[in-house]
Each structure stands twice: as structure tokens, then as C-alpha cells.
Image (spheres, helix red, strand yellow):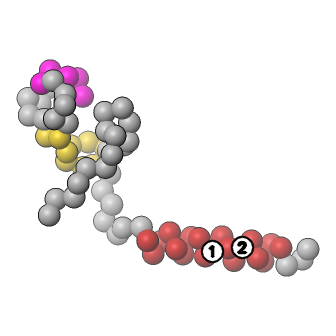
Amino acid sequence: MPSTPAVLGAITMSGVAAAAWAWPAADPDVIEHANADLEPGHPHLHGDRRHAHAHAYVINDLHHRWPARAA
């Protein structure tokens, strides 16, 4: 029983270290992307007549997957 906190702490620190190592260093909140399937007057486009726009990107009903990275 006395070793349980040490073991759980080591597992936690291993997970934190793995996440810090694996997470991309440059992970922007605002991503420029296009919603080609939206009509030009859709409110999501914020009055922009083009389909390309930028905002804080989240997966939701309008964004089903992360946009492809520009090469």
C-alpha cells in the first residue's frame, strides 16, 4: 500500500513526458481553411465571399476533420 502513490505518480509523470514529447511544438489555434460546401452567404464565413477564412479551429458540425497541412 505505501508504494501505490509512488507507482501512480511515476505512471502520471511518464504520461506527461510522453505527451510533451509527442505534441507538436507549433500548434496554432487559428488555422486558415476553406469550407467549400458552404453557400457564399453562410454566417460562418462572416461576410467573406471567398470560402477560405481563418478562426480558432474546432471539430464540430461545420469542421468534420482537421484541415490538411500546407506543403
Placement of 61 over or under 2, stated as above or below: above
Image quadrant in which you'd find residue 8: bottom right
Q: Which residue is mark 2?
A: 9
Image quadrant in which you'd find residue 40: top left
Percent x, y for residue 28?
30, 56
Helix, strand or loop for disc 1: helix
* Front-most of residues 12 and 69: 69
Asked whether, in this view, residue 24 is left or right of residue 34, the answer is: right
Q: Quadrant of the C terminus?
A: bottom left
Percent x, y for residue 21?
45, 75
Q: Does any portion of residue 53 appear in the rendered image?
A: no
Asked whether, in this view, residue 14 is left or right of residue 41, the answer is: right
Helix, strand or loop for disc 2: helix
Q: Residue at coordinates 52% horizontally, 74% vertically from top-left? A: 18
Percent x, y for residue 36?
16, 35
Q: Residue at coordinates 78% horizontally, 77% vertically from top-left? A: 6
Boundaries of the magenta span: 40-46
Percent x, y for residue 1?
91, 74
- Would you call the spot at circle 1 few (<14 residues within 10 Å), some (14-19), or many (20 or more)? few
Q: Are marks 2 and 1 in contact (CB under 8 Å)?
A: yes
Q: Residue at coordinates 72% horizontally, 73% vertically from top-left? A: 9
Q: What is the number of the mark on residue 26?
A: none
Q: Which residue is mark 1?
A: 13
| Spatial CA span between label 2 and label 1 | 6 Å
Disc 1 residue type (three-letter): Met
Disc 2 residue type (three-letter): Gly
